[in-house]
Amino acid sequence: MAKKKLVIADMITVGELAAQLDLPLTKLIGELFKNGIMATVNQRIDFETALIIVEELGLDVELEKKDSTSMMSPSTRSERALSDKAQKRPPIVAVMGHVDHGKTSLLDAVLDTKVVSGEAGGITQHIAAYQTTYNGRSITLLDTPGHEAFSALRQHGAALTDVVVIVIAADDGVKPQTIEAIKFAQQANAKIVVAINKVDKPEADTNRVKTQLATDYKLVPEEWGGDTVMVEVSAKTKENLDKLLELVLLVSDLEELKADTDIPAEGLVIESHMEQGRGAVVSLLVEQGLINQGNYIVAGNSYGKVRTLLNFAGQPLKEAGPSTPATVTGFKELPQFGDRFSIYANEKTARQAAETHRLQHKQDVQATNISSTELLSMMTKRREKQLVNIIVKADVQGSLTSVTDALRLLESNELALRVIGSGVGNISENDIRLAASSEAVVYGFNVQLPPAVKRLAWQEKVSVRIFKIIYELIDDAKAVLTELLSPEVVETEVGKLVIKGVFRVTKEEVICGGEVTKGKIMPGLLARVFRNKEQIAEVEVKGVQRERQEAKEVFEGEMCGLQLKTQGRLNVEEGDKFEFFKRELVKRTL
Ligand code: GDP
């Protein structure tokens, strides 16, 4: 019998698919749920996911994708070739380093603004960008998100970064996040400038830092014949800060950094949040073209008319050109961190572009969308791994992405983390209900838990954990997940023995004697019994004797008596070799 043929769009909501398949909605949602996906009727799934569902349900339907090649997704980075009118643009510099090594203080000193004071516990919460000038030339500085969240930047901002300044405290040396920063720079193909900071401190040891970098990471300073640019600075005394900026410009001059300005502006959303009275406040980093007030702009699914255009310090800008960080208002909805933006000729084309993006948007899979790869990987993970459901709420889109990305980094071979819900704003009753039905943990970052919601969480026994500092949140998640990891069995060899005589063998016991050939033997140990190099049994040591006296331990070279517990009758013979070991359950950490 021929299968029923159905032509569906590339993206389809769960509700539409159920209708098309003539399937009760609850059945479809149930099927998704069984596969570890919380779906709502309005959630969109892509064609491949629909295929999988049809197959899983054993439906007699053949799905065909509606041709939609004519629609171009605006979310892909434009690879436009430069015209000969292209102009020089400022370098985009990411400042990275281990926590407390002075990243923010350096930015602060260079910018002479109070960046540090706006932070909770000294952690920068979301990517923001600033600009400074040196010798009349501009430099754009990206402040990287809360340390563990490099992956957010890796994903969205890597292509933008021209230079990475790696900040290392001279009194502390290379640390895990320094290594991440080095890796990031290498993957992003960015130039590196190492800023060895805190040289004013008496404990500062710049040579040690340089040696670490040279021997372990092949970053050899120029003065030692290598080609890595390093500068010794102090954010406190402001020593060598000019030199740092000079070197940043020098290394960026090695690349010809240019962009066109007489084409429609494009770039990346680097921060977005809602503000009372101002609506969506969106920070953009321009890659090419010029943004002007009154322009029609599209980012992701949202569009609007640029109402105000401000520089990083909140002062009005006439226009924002390549490499410029700018803050705009006027978007009708909140675009997401990492969305690409473009300028359109009029409101109609802008609205259409946003709508097209809404329909086509599937690469940047958000928490509310499901892709086939995600579904497939969930299916396999569900079989192989322990699944932990998480709901994340944060104050702004930038921190939400940072937190979710950092949480995902905690995945291990045995634990799959699934963010089943996420959003900007306070924790709501809906979040608690979703958490209760899917046994999820709710993480809040810089958000509130209203009393009514708290009560509900208590009733539903939902664990809600709220933090103001990313790394504390991540540490907490680590602890929660570690609890879930099954302990590891660790065996440690303790001693060896060769049998010299057998005195008594019963169904579950052997009394014998032998010579300890290595290490020591004590009661409580386990032993593998070998005959002609082949293992014949595993036994437990009940008692050890030295000259017919019970002993706590006997050592290499000594003769001893053994009382062994066996599983069934074990005919131990003279010459059998025993290997004694301890078997312990060790709690694992992520
Ligand atoms: P971040 O976590 O990398 O952003 O580090 P911060 O900029 O918050 O600095 C961490 C701590 O180191 C703060 O207490 C700073 O005052 C201090 N610090 C930063 N730079 C210097 C420096 O050059 N010299 C000294 N003595 N202290 C510094």
Image (cartoon, rainbow, N blue to C red):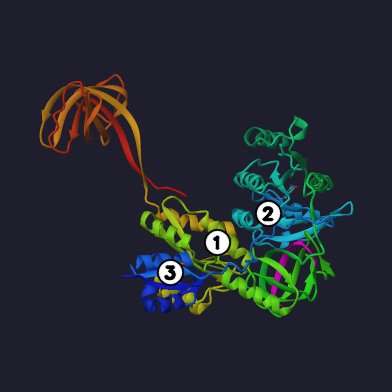
Quadrant for residue 358, please give it.
bottom right
- Of residue 146 and residue 42, the one placed in the foreground of this image is 42
Taking the spot 24% from the left edge, 28% from the top edge, the residue there is: 534
In space, the residues marked 3 and 1 are separated at their CA atoms by 33 Å
Give the mark, 2 or 3, whose residue is nearer the N terminus: 3
User: Which mark identifies residue 404?
Assistant: 1
In space, the residues marked 2 and 1 are separated at their CA atoms by 21 Å
The furthest residue to the front: 2
- Across and down, in percent, residue 152 comes to 61, 57
Residue position for label 2 = 159
Q: Residues within 10 Å of mark 3 (few under 14, many from 20)?
A: some
**What amino acid type is highlighted by mark number 3?**
Leu
- Across and down, in percent, residue 481 comes to 44, 56
Q: Quadrant of the N terminus?
A: bottom left
Q: Which residues are magenta?
A: 278-290
Q: Is residue 458 above or below residue 535?
A: below
Give the mark, 3 or 1, whose residue is nearer the N terminus: 3
**What amino acid type is highlighted by mark number 1?**
Thr
Characterize the magenta stretch by its predominant secondary structure: strand
Q: Residues within 10 Å of mark 1 (few under 14, many from 20)?
A: many
Quadrant for residue 340, please give it.
bottom right
Left-right relation of 238 to 511: right
**What amino acid type is highlighted by mark number 2?**
Ala
Left-right relation of 362 to 17: right
- Across and down, in percent, residue 543 comes to 21, 33
Q: Is residue 494 above or below residue 13?
A: above
Q: Say if disc 2 is inside 8 Å of ligand 1.
A: no
Q: Which one is in front in this view, the residue at disc 2 or the one at disc 3?
A: 3
- Across and down, in percent, residue 553 comes to 29, 29
Give the mark, 2 or 1, whose residue is nearer the N terminus: 2
